[in-house]
Each structure stands twice: as C-alpha cells, then as structure tokens.
C-alpha cells in the first residue's frame, strides 16, 4: 500500500512538473523582471526634478515681477496688521530704546512725533527684507488709531527706491516712507 501511494504521488507531481524548457523560460522572465525593477526613488526622480524646476521658475518670476518698494510695502502692511500689540510696553521713546537693546543701531525720535499728537505704546523687534528693524507702536491722539513705525539704518541698496514714492497704500494700510537722521523710517496705519 505504501508503494502504491508513493507511485501515485510521483505520477501526480510528474504530471504537474515543469519540463526543462518551461523552467528555463520562467528563470529568464524572473531575471528580466529583476533588471527592469528600479527603486521607487529612481522612478520618482524625474517627477521630483520637474517639480523643483517649475517651483524655481515660479519663485524667480515672482521675485523679478515684484519691485523692492512693493516687497517692502507688502511686508509693512502685513506686519502692521499682525503686530498690533507691542512686545514691550513703554510710554516713552527712551523706554522703547532700552527694551530694544539688541538692535545694532539706536532708534531716532522722528520730527513728526509730537507728544501732543502721539502716544508711545511700546516696541517690538521686526524684520524687513530679511533685516532686523525696530518697531515702535504708536497711537494718534486725534483719531485714536494704532500706527507702527519701522526704523532701520538707511541703505542705498534699496532705500532710495522705497523713499522715491513717499506715500503708498497697500491692502487698506496707508504707508509713508522717508529718510531722517540716517535712518529709513516707515509709518504704517489706517
């Protein structure tokens, strides 16, 4: 009985076994699949490269299409809307200067800042085109509106472009830019 079962198993498996030609064909297919199969990153590399290429092109076009004054005014209007509260509360310009002691320059008191017309609320650190600026938060006594005064050392690099047009309006914010006492001053408000 054991030999009968053994013979039947051999016949069954021999009937389903691959011949040499079939086995060689399968081995050939397996080798060709291994050669064609690439890591996922290699398959995605053209897509990633084209994404960087398109992104870089869009960035360059946007940078070239915006002038320096447009970039400055966009940052100032956005900064004014977002920084209504001073990081350091103060009631005088001198007090603001003592709080903003990490600036590499001294703040100046602009000629327009008359104590009868303006209240100093405090100061903050800010950025303008990647440079650190001093922000002085003010309130106008006449209209009770909040204003932000940006100060940074004047630079011919882009300062002339900004002050060439003294008044701007961006996203509902009125902006005035001028040069005073070696500083670039930008006042933003309603």
Image (spheres, rainbow, N blue to C red):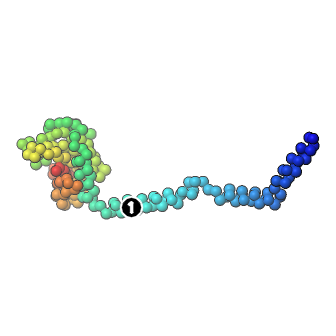
Q: Residues within 10 Å of mark 1 (few under 14, many from 20)?
A: few
Q: Measuring 17% from the left and 46% from the top, which residue is drawn there?
A: 147
What secondary structure is found at the residue carrying circle 1?
Answer: helix
- In the rendered view, would you say 97 is above or below 32? above
Q: Give the image location of residue 177, x and y in percent.
A: 18, 54
Q: Quadrant of residue 61?
A: bottom left
Q: Quadrant of residue 101?
A: top left
Q: Quadrant of the N terminus?
A: top right
Q: Measuring 40% from the left and 62% from the top, which residue is drawn there?
A: 57
Q: Is residue 18 left or right of residue 178?
A: right
Q: Is residue 49 visible?
A: yes
Q: Measuring 14% from the left and 43% from the top, which residue is drawn there?
A: 139
The answer to which of 3 and 53 lies nearer the viewer is: 3
- In the rendered view, would you say 92 is above or below 159? above
The answer to which of 30 and 140 lies nearer the viewer is: 30
From this viewpoint, which residue is outermost toward the front?
Answer: 1
Q: On the image, numbered disc 1 is attached to which residue?
A: 58
Q: Is residue 101 visible?
A: no
Q: Count the marks: how many?
A: 1
Q: Is residue 72 left or right of residue 31?
A: left
Q: Give the image location of residue 167, x and y in percent.
A: 16, 57
Q: Is residue 25 left or right of residue 171?
A: right
Q: Measuring 42% from the left and 59% from the top, which residue is drawn there?
A: 55
Q: Give the image location of residue 94, x and y in percent.
A: 16, 38
From this viewpoint, which residue is outermost toward the left?
Answer: 116
Q: Give the image location of residue 25, x and y in percent.
A: 77, 60
């Amino acid at each position: 009985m054991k030999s009968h079962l053994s013979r039947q198993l051999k016949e069954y498996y021999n009937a389903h076994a691959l011949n040499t030609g079939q086995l060689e064909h399968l081995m050939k297919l397996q080798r060709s699949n291994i050669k064609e199969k690439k890591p996922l990153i290699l398959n995605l590399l053209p897509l990633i490269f084209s994404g960087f290429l398109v992104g870089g092109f869009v960035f360059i076009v946007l940078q070239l299409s915006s002038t320096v004054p447009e970039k400055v005014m966009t940052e100032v209007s956005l900064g004014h809307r977002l920084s209504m509260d001073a990081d350091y509360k103060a009631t005088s310009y001198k007090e603001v200067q003592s709080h903003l002691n990490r600036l590499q320059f001294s703040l100046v008191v602009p000629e327009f800042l008359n104590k009868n017309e303006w209240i100093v609320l405090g100061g903050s650190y800010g950025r303008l085109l990647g440079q650190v600026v001093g922000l002085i938060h003010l309130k106008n006594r006449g209209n009770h509106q909040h204003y932000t005064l940006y100060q940074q050392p004047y630079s011919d690099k882009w300062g002339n472009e900004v002050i060439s047009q003294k008044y701007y309006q961006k996203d509902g914010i009125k902006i005035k830019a001028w040069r005073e006492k070696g500083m670039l001053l930008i006042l933003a408000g309603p």
